[in-house]
């Protein structure tokens, strides 16, 4: 047992040696970023790319800890419960849906928002053999007989990709609670369902579907972005169909537990800003097909509040009670 | 196709070859440590390969993961602690051979079958990747559900002497698989309010607990060294000469099953190994016997399958950018970062890159034979050391393995709980393998069943009205009916015989 404890102690040394004087110059030792997703996914990849540029800015090594269990709940809980000294922060992403499925109850007050660095718009894709040629045709059909159609959410439903789409449909007068929303284990499971004819539509990010789009297996109807997405200029904007700009999708930000000292949070924010603006990060994100989206701590806090309100509205319409 | 000379020119890069060699050794070490998986080996490589050029980066992953899957057999055979979940199917068979002093037979057969599986799947990959990827894409939740049921039927073949105890173990595995978030609605189940249980019981900590920790507990009572004295590792090369001609059908069948299962997104090397193992047990005269020869047949078909599935996973990954398993999910993100965007355009615009990647499979799998033999010998030395030195080191690695996979102390607690459970189960001769099978297949079954029901709004016809799904479904039900009917027929016959010739017994 003692042996085991000492091993664990060594492993945790990076984060456990808290205490001592509050440093005038943060950080004085390695910092930890908790990623509430498994290694290899979008959340993990973007954070690792950011961390690579951040290490130079902070002057300290960064340890990335993946905790993908429970669809992100475990990792987010670790971030929320971390010591608010700035040495442990984590990746934040749309989290409000967990409340409605009863998995966890996170809110903006649980975290110290630091900065947003990545954003990708949600889109609606169909199989190439689908009868729908435009978003308008699809929305009208869904309005006429919502119960006939199946939409794949990519990940869990009530989450990143489907909530903005459902919100748009709600505004269009579609009875979203009549549609069959099919949850899955990520974009890949949804894309195979779509290609094999298991579902009619899928809500997904464009980069994740791009290989199959090029192969002519799936086809985008529209993207929920206020302006054309670089690399996908020929995909029409959802706003052009519904008559007002539509903006929805994922956001990925760095945040810590609530109560990080202001100057420490400011150091983080400045470092992330410099990292995001660096050519190295911009290039890496572009080749990996991820959208760079900078938001300050203040903007991020506002985003988190709108995210919670929007999720509340959609989830209530979908029939989830809370 | 492209000019083979261009591929050779790419391969001849000494830096590339050095990367393959180093990562192969690294993969062997990781795979040989119980609890550290091929996925782990790949994930740990990412921070290093991010600085490499595209080809060496992908080569690093290919060689490390192929070696890790094979190396998982070594502790499985020598210590009955499968190094990776993919080796769990035949750990008992291989360990049985070791106890009879035939470790080199089991391991040699596994090594050659692994390499052969890898080579065969690489050949398939090079010849018909785009075509196979189309087939993989025609699988919806219905097809996966039937595949899962087919996999579950394997439990009846790995249950051991008592079918009842085997089923109890399988159901325990399925029950444990329900802990955590419901895969469809996301509702927490059996979590007792604990955030740690929210993620379910991790397969790796449970596997380490059931197999490795329980074995350590048992060894604390029995003198490991005394038992292993009879063991002398013979020449592995000699084994290969014997094994190959005799089991070539099993190798081909395993490689074929592995490649197909690997190509399906959502079914990985562990499922491939189980299905192939059960096929070997059921549909081969040699494999169904409880002799050494039968054990070798089963080891060969499952080892070929788990290595072949690695290559299979690259089929949808390279053609459509859809990961066939968690390892290729990492490969895809690395490829994106390196600017080689997987997809059909890659085959059209940069065929030399894609075919060089396939060629690396051949190199890595050939290299597996000499490196694997070295690794088996090195590991064999451990058996000659007294248990009091070996056991603490293994325990240390078990703890490290569990912690590093989940990054929580909770996982370390899990291995202790499941270690005790495994010890109690074994002491009452309840087999462990079906429980692991249940734990692996439970989530797949539940997820695909629920998804299908959601899509059809409760109509069970949905399970039969798709051509491929319906066929697999009818086939599966047919196998079950046939098995039950044969069992009933046999026992009726035997009873008849017993009644007539009781005096001959």
Image (cartoon, coloured by chain):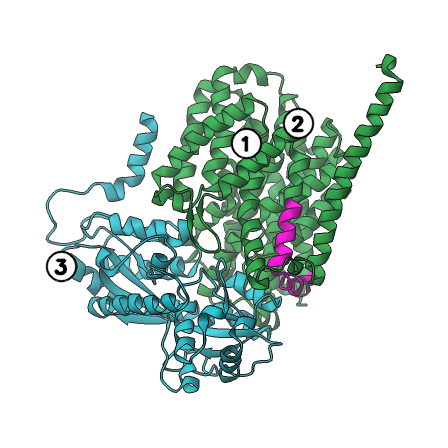
Q: Compute the Cα span from label 2 to label 1.
A: 26 Å
Would you say B163 lies left or right of B15 here?
right
Q: Which chain is green?
A: B
Residue A110 percent location from the top left of the image: 23, 55
Query: Looking at the image, is A269 positioned above or below residue B285?
Result: below
Q: Nearer the viewer, residue A185 or B292?
A: A185
Q: Nearer the viewer, mark 2 or mark 1?
A: 2
| Circle nearer the N terminus (2, 1) | 1
Q: Which residue is mark 2?
A: B162
Q: Look at the numbered disc 3 and give the secondary structure of its residue.
A: helix
Residue B18 in view: yes
Q: Look at the numbered disc 2 and give the secondary structure of its residue.
A: loop
Q: Compute the Cα span from label 1 to label 3.
A: 52 Å
Within the image, what quadrant is residue B295 found in? top right
Q: Is residue A15 magenta?
A: no
Residue at x 60% of width, y 77% of height: A130
Q: Compute the Cα span from label 3 to label 2.
A: 65 Å
Q: Which residue is mark 3?
A: A262
Q: Chain of mark 2?
A: B
Would you say A30 lies left or right of B457 here?
left
Residue B169 percent location from the top left of the image: 57, 33
Give the magenta range.
B127-151
Chain A shown in which color? cyan
Residue at x 87% of width, y 14% of height: B504
Query: Looking at the image, is B157 positioned above or below residue A305?
Result: above
**What label does residue B75 carry, if any?**
1
């Amino acid at each position: 047992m003692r042996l085991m404890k000492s091993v664990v102690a060594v492993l945790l040394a990076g984060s456990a040696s808290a205490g001592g004087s509050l440093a005038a110059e943060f950080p004085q030792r390695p910092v930890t970023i908790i990623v509430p997703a498994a290694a290899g996914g979008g959340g993990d990849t973007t954070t690792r790319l950011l961390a690579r540029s951040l290490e130079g800015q902070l002057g300290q090594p960064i340890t990335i800890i993946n905790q993908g269990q429970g669809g992100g709940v475990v990792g987010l809980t670790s971030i929320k419960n971390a010591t608010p000294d700035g040495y442990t922060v984590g990746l934040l992403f749309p989290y409000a849906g967990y409340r409605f499925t009863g998995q966890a109850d996170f809110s903006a007050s649980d975290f110290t928002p630091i900065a947003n660095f990545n954003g990708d718009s949600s889109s609606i894709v169909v199989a190439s053999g689908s009868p729908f040629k435009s978003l308008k045709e699809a929305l009208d059909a869904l309005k006429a007989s919502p119960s006939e159609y199946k939409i794949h959410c990519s990940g869990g439903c009530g989450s990143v990709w489907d909530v903005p789409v459902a919100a748009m449909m709600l505004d269009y007068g579609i009875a979203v609670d009549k549609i069959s929303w099919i949850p899955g284990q990520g974009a890949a499971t949804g894309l195979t369902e779509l290609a094999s004819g298991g579902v009619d539509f899928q809500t997904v990010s464009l980069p994740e579907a791009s290989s199959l789009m090029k192969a002519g297996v799936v086809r985008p109807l529209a993207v929920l972005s206020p302006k054309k997405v670089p690399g996908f200029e020929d995909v029409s904007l959802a706003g052009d169909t519904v008559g007002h700009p539509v903006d929805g999708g994922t956001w990925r930000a760095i945040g810590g537990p609530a109560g990080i000292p202001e100057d420490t949070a400011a150091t983080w924010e400045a470092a992330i800003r410099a990292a995001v603006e660096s050519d190295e990060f911009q290039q890496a994100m572009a080749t990996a097909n991820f959208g760079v989206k900078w938001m300050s701590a203040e903007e991020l806090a506002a985003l988190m509040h709108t995210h919670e309100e929007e999720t509340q509205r959609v989830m209530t319409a979908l029939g989830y009670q809370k | 196709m492209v000019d083979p000379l261009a591929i050779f020119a790419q391969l001849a890069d000494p830096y590339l070859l050095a990367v393959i060699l180093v990562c192969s050794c690294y993969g062997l070490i990781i795979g040989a440590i119980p609890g550290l998986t091929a996925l782990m080996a790949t994930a740990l490589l990412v921070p290093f390969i991010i600085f490499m050029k595209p080809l060496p980066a992908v080569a690093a992953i290919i060689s490390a993961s192929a070696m890790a899957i094979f190396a998982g057999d070594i502790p499985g055979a020598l210590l009955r602690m499968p190094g990776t979940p993919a080796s769990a199917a035949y750990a008992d068979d291989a360990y049985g051979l070791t106890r009879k002093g035939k470790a080199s037979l089991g391991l040699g057969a596994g090594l050659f079958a692994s390499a052969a599986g890898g080579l065969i799947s690489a050949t398939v990959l090079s010849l018909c990747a785009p075509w196979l990827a189309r087939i993989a894409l025609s699988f919806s939740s219905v097809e996966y559900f039937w595949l899962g049921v087919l996999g579950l039927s394997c439990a009846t073949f790995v249950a051991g002497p008592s079918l009842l105890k085997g089923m109890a173990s399988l159901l325990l595995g399925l029950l444990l698989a329900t802990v955590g978030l419901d895969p469809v609605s996301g509702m927490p189940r059996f979590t007792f309010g604990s955030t740690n249980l929210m993620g379910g019981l991790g397969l790796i900590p449970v596997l380490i607990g059931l197999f490795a920790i329980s074995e350590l507990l048992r060894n604390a009572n029995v003198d490991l060294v005394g038992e292993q004295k009879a063991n002398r590792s013979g020449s592995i090369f000699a084994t290969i000469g014997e094994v190959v001609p005799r089991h070539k059908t099993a190798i081909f069948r395993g490689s074929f099953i592995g490649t197909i299962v690997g190509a399906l997104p959502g079914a990985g090397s562990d499922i491939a190994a189980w299905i192939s193992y059960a096929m070997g047990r059921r549909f081969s005269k040699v494999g169904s016997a409880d002799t050494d020869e039968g054990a070798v047949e089963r080891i060969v078909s499952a080892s070929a399958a788990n290595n072949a599935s690695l290559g299979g996973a690259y089929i949808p990954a390279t053609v459509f950018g859809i990961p066939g398993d968690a390892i290729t999910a990492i490969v895809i993100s690395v490829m994106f970062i390196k600017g080689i965007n997987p997809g059909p355009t890659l085959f059209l615009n940069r065929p030399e890159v894609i075919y060089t990647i396939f060629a690396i499979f051949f190199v890595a799998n050939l290299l597996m034979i000499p490196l694997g033999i070295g690794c088996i010998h090195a590991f064999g030395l451990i058996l000659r050391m007294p248990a009091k030195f070996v056991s603490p080191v293994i325990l240390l690695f078990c703890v490290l393995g569990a912690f590093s996979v989940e990054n929580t102390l909770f996982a370390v607690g899990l291995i202790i709980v499941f270690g005790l459970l495994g010890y109690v189960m074994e002491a009452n001769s309840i087999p462990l393998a079906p429980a692991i099978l249940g734990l692996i297949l439970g989530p797949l079954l539940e997820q695909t069943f629920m998804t299908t029901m959601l899509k059809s709004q409760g109509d069970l016809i949905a399970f039969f009205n798709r051509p491929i799904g319906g066929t697999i479904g009818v086939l599966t039900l047919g196998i079950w009916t046939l098995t039950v009917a044969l069992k009933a027929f046999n026992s009726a016959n035997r009873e008849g015989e017993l009644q007539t010739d009781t005096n001959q017994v």
